[in-house]
Image: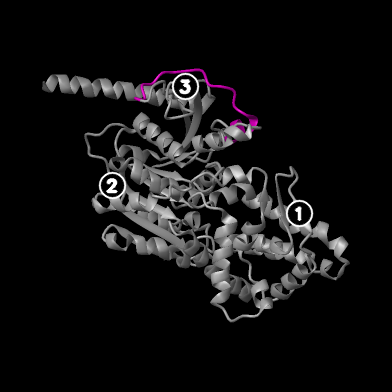
Amino acid sequence: MQLFSKLRKIFKIFQLLALVLISLLFANCGANKLTSQEISAKLAAREAPHRSAECQNFISHLPRNVTAGAYWVPLDWDHPSGEEILIYFYQYSIPESISEGKKPVVFFNGGPGVSAQSSVQLLANSQNLGKNRVIFLDQRGTGCSSSFPDDLDPSILSHKIKQFGVRSIVRDAEALRELIFGKSWSVAGHSFGSSIVMDYIHYAPDHVDSAYIYGNSVSNDPVAWSLGRIQSQERITQAYYDRYPDDKNLILKLKSMILDDDCFEDAHKKFRLCGGSLFDAAGLYLGFTDQWETFHNNLNKLRVSAFLPRQLILPTLKSQIFDQIDSQFNLPAYLLGNMTSGQDTKEICTKAYKLFKDSRAKNQEYLDSLLIDCRFLSELSIKGHEVIKKINFPNPNFIEHLQHELSKGNISLKIFTGKLDSLTSKESLMPLKNSLRPFSRNVTFFELEGGHEGYYVNKEFWDQIFQNSALYPSSHTNDI
């Protein structure tokens, strides 16, 4: 029996060495790739489809110590024998992390609808990852992975979006974990990626050693969550004006020049924003302290324009504020990311903002000076919005699922937010914090310096992750 066991281990090692060779061939020339023809993740070499020039350029300029790979998964995990799509992943590792058998961490970037590629560049070129192993996925529909279908019939759009949603991404990651590691790993996420982490805990708790989320405070009480976010934006708007005191009067001046029927559309006319809520959209910049200077500089370009006739300033406003926000934040995806339990954003924000106004004995000018993204989300008009808002995002029972898994005591969860993160603030974390209070032995909250961008700036976030990223047992050989 011992001989048979040893032979099985030797065979497994050779199988994995073949996997390494396939992966290296793919990373170097793109001719072969990892592929999964069955959910059981049996491997076979298969010719790669044509990659876009943008994808080829990214892979050819990957940072040092980062390799690329790809594998096939079902488009619809509930019908695994149907159409397949390709998922790309990137592994950061150095020889020491492989030889020491360190457990990998899978990191899910924010979005939705955003590839992992900027996170790969930012983190792999920083000192934060150290001598550790981190896996990034181009979530389905993004980056080098198979793209989301264009020009869908509205009658099937809702179904297709669900196929590209959180649970499908979790199952894609599970296929990769089984494909190249076999054992459990740590899961971490930023913003929308944190929603993936929380669903991962529910879907595959036995394969999660520890979990880390940065910049996500969603709750099953959307009005309380939105109110907390508004309260933080009041605090952080003031912090912005402390840094740039002249901007407050300029914003009020420009805001007064925009009438309710002045509307701004994107180049593809997929969405429209009318009235002074344009500047509330600019409040998105508040969440990213590394973007404050950009917003300030854009305002400075409008300083002289504030004295021009209204008809002349509107095109400048569109180019300097609206177009900049659209390119920076991808407004349709941002709206989708803020849908809560299938409820209408406008209804939620209207209720939350009324609670906020009623709790403040402030004049209208003061309220107008604040940059509150909930007011702009109430006014943003998006083509297909009626279809999008029917999608339950996130799962309305996710808190109960999270509580259930944490009650078992097998998973530790660490939740991080930035002190100046107006998108996911300590105020908006309160509903989630209260929900998880009974499980305080397994849940820890951290408040770090900076804003929503802190996941790549704050080394403490990654130190906490790697502190609990133990080594695999010496007998484990599933390493690439």
Q: Between residues 132 and 418, which one lies in front from this camera angle?
A: 418
Q: Mark 1 points at which residue?
A: 264
Badge 2 marks a residue whose secondary structure is loop
Closer to the chain start, of discs 1 and 2, is: 1
Residue found at x 49% / y 21%: 32
**Magenta-colored stretch includes residue 394:** no
Residue 466 visible in the displayed image: no
Q: Residues within 10 Å of mark 3 (few under 14, many from 20)?
A: few
Which x, y percent locates residue 248?
Answer: 69, 74
Which x, y percent locates residue 303?
Answer: 79, 69
Closer to the chain start, of discs 1 and 3, is: 3
Horizontally, residue 208 falls left or right of residue 125, namely: left
For the rendered model, the colour scheme is: one colour
Label at residue 82: 3
Which region is colored magenta? Answer: 40-58
Single out the mark in the foreground, 1 or 2: 1
Give, as a three-letter code, the residue at label 1. Answer: Phe
Q: Name the residue under label 2.
A: 470
Estimate the spatial distance between the alpha carbons at disc 3 and disc 2, rounded to whole Å. 38 Å
Q: Do the residues labelled 1 and 2 touch (CB within 8 Å)?
A: no
Which x, y percent locates residue 142?
Answer: 56, 37
Q: Quadrant of the N terminus?
A: top left
